[in-house]
Amino acid sequence: MHIVTLGEILIDMFPAEVGRPLTQVTAFHPKPGGAPANVAVAARRLGATTAYIGKVGEDIFGHQLIDVLRQEGVETRGMCIDEEARTTMAIIALPDANTAEFVFYRNPGADLQLRADELDDGLLQNTRALHIGSLSLVAEPARTATQTAVATAKEAGALISFDVNYRPSLWRSPKEALAQIEKMIPQVDLVKVNEVELALLAGDGVETAVALQAILSQGTSLCVLTRGPHGSRAQTAVGAVEVPAFPVTTVDATGCGDAFIAALLFQLTKTADWRQALVPEQLRQALRFANAVGALTAQTQGVIPALPTAVQVQNFLSQQPIST
C-alpha cells in the first residue's frame, strides 16, 4: 500500500451560491468529503494504492460514503460503522471562491467514535505513508486511536504526514487545539500548514522561514506551507524551495489543500525511501505537480467530484511554461 489515511469522513453540504454568507445561502447540495477521505481518493486517482481508516454512522450517508470510496478504488476494510452516532455533516458557505465558512454537525459524530482496538494493524504496518489531520484529535476515543495508529505505522517504517487543518469551531479553545497539535508534531515526518495555521503555531509576525524552521526543530523532516493563489513552500533542514501557483479561475478552493497533500504524498511514496526525494530539485518538481493538482481541483465545486486524474494533471502541466 502506498498511502493510508485516517480521520474524519463526512457529508459536505455545499452552498447553491458562491458570494453569500452562511445565513443567506438558499440551498445546499450534499457531497462526500472529509480531509483524510479526500486525500485517499485524490491519491488513488493519481495512481497510488490507498486505504482509508475511519468510522461512519449506521445511516444512509454513512453507507453512501463507504460506497463512494469503494467506487473510487480506495480500500475500505479499515472502516467501521457506529450504530449510535450519526455520520458527521459540515454545512459550508463560500463568501468568495477562496474563503469557506463551516458549521459542523458533530456532537459527537461517528468519526470521533473510532477506537484504538478497531484499527486495522495490517494496513498500518504495510503502508509507505500514513496521513492524518487534527480533526481526529479533538476528542476521545478518536484521539487515542489516531495516536496509536501513528505509533504503529511509524514503528513499521512509514512516512507520517500531518495536516494541521485547524477548524476553530470544533475545539473548545485555540489553546486546547494548539496543545494537541503541538503534541503530535514531534511524532510525524511531514507537517502541512497554511498561513493561518503557521501563525497559530509560531505567533503573529514571526518570519515565515523562522516559523517553519521552528517546526522542523521538533524532529519533522519536511514542513510544507500552502499559500493558495501564491503557491507553496517546502522547508527541510538543508533549505527551502518555493514554487508559484498556476493562474486559474477559482470556482471553489475547498479541498485544494487535500488535493495538494495527496499529490505530494503520491510523489514521495513512488519509492520505498521517501527521504531520497527531499533534495531541492525533486522537491521543486513535487511541489509543481502538487500545485497543479490543487489548481485543477479549484475549478470545480465540491472536493471529491473535482479531484483530477493523472492524465488530466499531465495534460495541464504540458500546457504550462516550465519556468512556473
Image: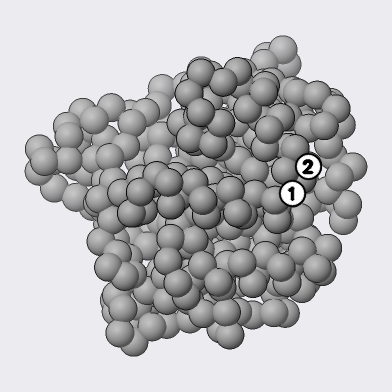
Q: Nearer the viewer, residue 243 or 48?
A: 243
Which disc, if any, is residue 11?
none
* Amino acid type at image mark 2: Ser
Asked if labels 1 and 2 touch by Cβ distance under 8 angstroms, the answer is yes
The residue that label 1 is drawn on is 189
The mark that comes first in sequence, 2 or 1, is: 1
Left or right: where 310 falls relative to 169: right
Taking the spot 49% from the left edge, 61% from the top edge, the residue there is: 137
Left or right: where 262 falls relative to 175: right
Residue 121 position by quadrant: bottom right
Taking the spot 73% from the left edge, 16% from the top edge, the residue there is: 322
The correct choice, above or below, for 322 with respect to 180 in the image is above
Residue 50 position by quadrant: bottom right
The residues tagged by marks 2 and 1 sit, at their Cα atoms, a distance apart of 5 Å
Taking the spot 75% from the left edge, 37% from the top edge, the residue there is: 217
Q: Tag 2, which secondary structure?
A: loop
Residue 199 visible in the snapshot? yes
Q: Tag 1, which secondary structure?
A: loop
Percent position of residue 68, x then y: 45, 66
Percent position of residue 57, x then y: 35, 78
Percent position of residue 87, x then y: 33, 71
Which class describes the residues within 10 Å of circle 1: few (<14), some (14-19), or many (20+)? many
Residue 251 position by quadrant: top left
The correct choice, above or below, for 123 with respect to 235 in the image is below
- Report the quarter where the N terminus lies: bottom right
- Report the quarter where the C terminus lies: top right
Taking the spot 61% from the left edge, 21% from the top edge, the residue there is: 208
Left or right: where 2 falls relative to 176: right
The residue that label 2 is drawn on is 221
The correct choice, above or below, for 316 with respect to 171 in the image is above
* Amino acid type at image mark 1: Asp
Percent position of residue 45, x then y: 60, 53
